[in-house]
Image (spheres, helix red, strand yellow):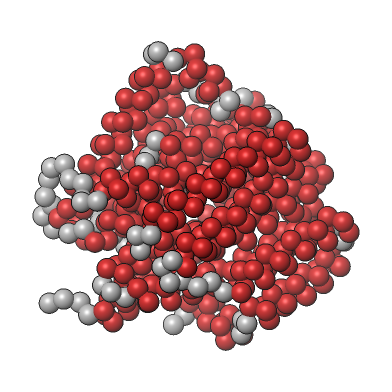
Amino acid sequence: MTESGDDLGNRTGSAAVRGLRWAFWLNAVTLPMSFATSLVLGRSSAGALGAYTATQIFIGAFQTFFIFGGNAVFTRFVPTLPRDRRIAFLLSYLALVLGIFTAAALLLAFPARVALDRLLERFGSPAPVLAYAVAASVVVWAFCSYFLYGIEQAPKAALALKFVVLGYFVFAMTCLAPAGSALLRNPPRSLWAATAVIYGLAACLAAALVAAAPSLHAVNRTGFYLPPGFWAVVVYTHLGTVVEFVYSSLSPSVVLLWLDVESLGRLTAALRWVALLALLPAMFVSVVAPGFAKLDASGRRDDALRRTRSAVRAAELAVVPSVFALILFAPAFMGLFGPGYRDHAGLLRIAALSALAGPTVYIGSGLAVALGALRAYLAVSVLYVAASLVLNAVLVPRLGLAGAAAAMAVSSAAQCVIVTIVLRGVGFRGSRSTWIGWSLGVAVAAFASLVQPALAPAFVVWLALTAGFAWGAGATWSELRGLSARLMGAR
């Protein structure tokens, strides 16, 4: 018996809400851990925080340039694959990526060893073998976690992904103990050793969760298997991961390569707050994107578009007022990392604007991939990547850290426009709340930079801006209460 469209839409929506709720609470638990890690390292020294960020840039760059396709490929294929083919697809894809990466690593390790050592020096000079072990663990961890999202096991996927946060938290707490204080005498060496352990354990956990998934207990067909259309999707989605890396990590990477690790630490203090706001839309898209693909496959594209509009709006109602707060209270937020960071509050005021693009970029890109609008999305994204490279190349050498923050803000605005244009091609129409948020955000950033208000006036301005945004967006009390109730678990 086939499943009706209404049943599928209701079941998909219910699974998405359950997954979103679990991810919400898991983030609520792990966010303090993540911040504690950055605070401990940042208060130790900007160099220690910069060294921590350098390892994360290495992992992000590896996932971008060596794991071709990644999460978007799983989102596109796994929900619609026969169950007896899913494990074969996972193992085939994993073996393919590990094989290509290993061949590339061997080529770098012997003919180009000097160039490899110079490159790794910027990331803290890990031994090539250690860097390879971390990279291989990242592949297993990422693929298994993405696969769990694809089979709608969002709680398990979120657990595997957030395990690394717990690992770094344990490392940071160990550094606070008298016996562990020596770890921060040479932060790069200690952080790379911790990273190898953390991602190794995370890979084992993700693989174990895949093996225990209840929906895979049926007989699985073995052998090498890649579904029809795999390579076409990989080519487009790989460029999509490059776009995402540019969106999130290009400016910190340029700071690391052009300036120094201490400058990277100061920029990281600002970006840690911005990253908080990116979690909500990223959480939405990880949970609901597989449902978009299933709804579209069943002829329910209108339902997928409606769910996307709801997700974008819900994310904006939370993100935009939070951006206002980061801008107005920037000195206080930066000061948590140490007194010396307060002088760099301007970085947070500028960089916070980039978070305004998050709801449209993350959720809209997830919809474009799920509906197969890859060609249009990636074609226009090439322009965004080129613009970001030019902005960073021009602004960072001339303006330093302020230039990096400005490049992030302008690039994010451009990406928001690009995704909006692409989504119009699949029938999605954005709301005025997006542009109201951007207009008010730029205005309050200029105001705060010129006036630098004290806490009490800043709070009054924040209340006025939040009320103005809610009114302009047409938000109602019942809508806000309903959103809060769904996240908190009420029906």
At a point 78% along the width and 44% down the height, the residue shown is: 344
83 is higher (above) or lower (below) than 320: above
Front in this rendered view, residue 469 or 274? 469
Q: Position of 9 compared to 283: left or right?
A: left
Residue 257, percent across and down? Answer: 62, 29
Q: Quadrant of the C terminus?
A: bottom left
Q: Is residue 485 above or below residue 418?
A: below
Q: Residue at x 81, y 58 (%)?
A: 446
Residue 204, quarter of picture: top left
Task: State the quadrant of the N terminus.
Answer: bottom left
Q: Position of residue 191 (x, y in %)?
A: 54, 32
Report the front residue among 350 and 328.
350
Residue beneath the point at 34% across and 30% down: 101
> Would you place residue 12 above or below residue 248 in this image?
below
Front-most of residues 382 and 105: 382
Q: Position of residue 223 (x, y in %)?
A: 13, 42
Q: Is residue 139 left or right of residue 247?
A: left
Task: Answer whether residue 26 is visible to the viewer in this image.
Answer: no
Q: How many marks?
A: 0
- Note whether 367 is above or below 106 in the view shown: below
Q: Splitting the image into 4 quarters, where does residue 438 fall?
A: bottom right
Residue at the image position 23 percent from the left and 43 percent from the top: 91
Location of residue 272 in the rendering, given as x and y in whole percent from the top left corner = 63, 49
Q: Is residue 408 visible?
A: yes
